[in-house]
Image (tube, rainbow, N blue to C red):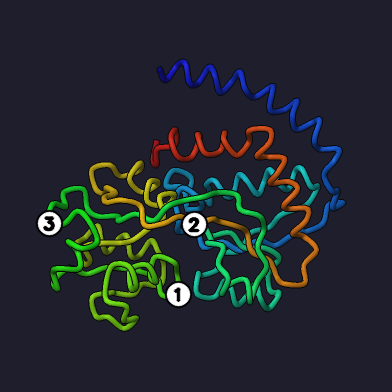
Amino acid sequence: MKRTLLSLAVAVLPMLGAGFAAQAADLPDLGGREVVIASENTYPPLQFIDPQTSQPAGWEYEAIDEIAKRLNMKVTYENVSWDAMIPAISAGEYDVAMNGITIRGDRAEKVAFSDPYMRSEMYMLVRADEDRFTDPAGFAGNDDFLAGAQPGTTPFYVTVYEVLDGDENNQRIKLFETFGAAVQALKVGDVDLVLTDSTGGQGYVNANPDTFKLIGDPMGTEDFGFIFPKNTDLIEPFNAAIASMRADGTLDALNKKWFFDYKAGQ
């Protein structure tokens, strides 16, 4: 089966190239414009530091690199913490940010969003040997269980309002500066649960199947988009490139590579 899948992927590449060639003429040409993109690098498989190369890697990096080729723009990347990312984009300090960012109305008051490039669902990420609870009610019913989350993120608010009692100051939620730090706390037993969209969660499970697992039913869906300053002229070109990548199968190829084929450290 693996050989068949690899052969299929190779066979598809020429067709993807032909589709791109046909659509490239219809895309905006940014004339080599320099675009600065912010990323936190803590959210595999979307963006993270590859353990083999110690370099940034992931779905979003490859997607942006492909967008850059199609739009004729030059990209540089800056590492920015999540809590500073939306304010920095809103202030125009960077041109674009990528971080598995959920498209939400409250955020759209501060920044502009691209069209969605991915849809995901929220799941419970736990240690692989977890057998004390299997759903939100089981977790909420034991006051000794702790959840880890980044403040201001979708997982934080879902933990507050759909898992616990609606109190944002609930002492059962331990706050961390990065998603990766929350997952590390889960790994070592400092917390018992981290909510994550299926995208990031499956990335951790695929890379560490003996350490983590996803449990329970999905708790709603969320769409991811790139974010921009409100006054940017980059949204229309980005949306055109995303549409072309969806149409010619490039987004599907990225999904296959990073969610099914990629194994960290191999």
Residue 263, x across and y down, in percent: 40, 37
Marks 2/3: CA–CA distance: 28 Å
Q: What element carries label 1?
A: loop
**Whole-Å distance between the Cαs marked 2 and 1?**
15 Å
Which residue lies under the disc numbered 3?
Answer: 132
Identified by mark 1, the residue type is: Gly
Vertical position of residue 153 compared to residue 53: above or below: below
Q: Do the residues labelled 1 and 3 touch (CB within 8 Å)?
A: no
- For label 3, the crowd category at 10 Å Cα-Cα, with few meaning under 14, some 14 to 19 and many 20 or more, is few
Residue with the mark numbered 1: 152
Q: What residue type is labelled 2?
A: Glu
- Element assignment for label 3: loop
User: Which residue occupies 75% across, 48% down?
Assistant: 240
Q: In this view, does 192 lie to the left or right of 86?
A: left
Task: Give x and y (percent) for residue 106.
Answer: 56, 74
Residue type of the residue flagged with mark 3: Arg
Q: How crowded is the residue under tag 2: few (<14 C-alpha within 10 Å), some, or many (20+)?
A: some
The correct choice, above or below, for 81 with respect to 11 in the image is below
Asked if disc 2 and disc 1 are in contact, CB closer than 8 Å, the reply is: no
- Whichever of labels 2 and 3 marks the residue nearer the N terminus, that label is 3
Residue labelled with disc 2: 222
First of labels 2, 1 by sequence position: 1
Query: Tag 2, which secondary structure?
Result: strand
